[in-house]
Amino acid sequence: QVQLVESGGGLAQAGGSLRLSCAASYSVYAMGWFRQAPGKERELVVAIDYESEKIYYADPVKGRFTIPRNNAHHAIYLQMDTLKPEDTRVYYCVTSGRMARMFKGDTDYWGQGPQVTVSS
């Protein structure tokens, strides 16, 4: 069983930056970040497939979010720049056998989900 340890998050002002980190207990095929607001469906924000080295960014975050990674430590990060109030969500680190499965909500393990709050 893969364990995911997340850190980061918190409060930022609009236009500011925050960084989340997620470390897996061992290597996986794909990792990514979902986010969810109360009463809303979760959405896939960013994902990476280690085998194909493809990276996916959801349209609302393109150009603002990136996914730095440390492959040696099975870790990914979510660098969030130019934050907007609508980015206020709980952000979950997830793993999957393939990035393509994530689009169908087919995931294997989830992190604890730090809160990100952006004030206007």
Image (cartoon, helix red, strand yellow):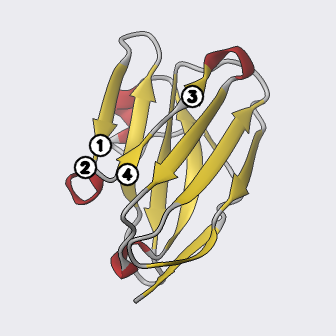
Determine which of the numbered discs, if any, sits on residue 62 in the image.
Answer: 2
Give yes or no for contact between labels 2 and 1 (Cβ–Cβ under 8 Å).
Answer: yes
- Tell me if mark 3 has few (under 14), some (14-19) or many (20+) residues whose alpha carbon lies within 10 angstroms of its own: some
User: In the figure, is residue 113 to the left or right of 26?
Assistant: left
User: In the figure, is residue 63 to the left or right of 69?
Assistant: left
Residue pushed farthest front? Answer: 16
Q: Earlier in the sequence, mark 4 or mark 3?
A: 4
User: SS of the residue at dot 3?
Assistant: strand
Give yes or no for contact between labels 1 and 4 (Cβ–Cβ under 8 Å).
Answer: yes
Residue pushed farthest left? Answer: 59
> Between marks 4 and 2, how big is the CA–CA gap?
9 Å
Determine which of the numbered discs, if any, sits on residue 69 in the image.
Answer: 3
Q: Earlier in the sequence, mark 1 or mark 4?
A: 4
Q: Nearer the viewer, mark 1 or mark 3?
A: 3
Which kind of residue does numbered mark 3 sit on? Answer: Arg
The percent position of residue 115, horizontal first and vertical second, equals 62, 71
Which kind of residue does numbered mark 4 sit on? Answer: Val
Quarter of the image that includes the N terminus: top right
In depth, the one of 103 and 86 nearer the eye is 86
Say above or below: 83 vs 59: below
Which kind of residue does numbered mark 1 sit on? Answer: Tyr
Quarter of the image that includes the C terminus: bottom left
User: SS of the residue at dot 1?
Assistant: strand
Q: Label 1: which residue?
A: 57
> Between marks 2 and 1, how big is the CA–CA gap?
6 Å
The percent position of residue 77, horizontal first and vertical second, equals 58, 41
**Figure quadrant of residue 46:** top left
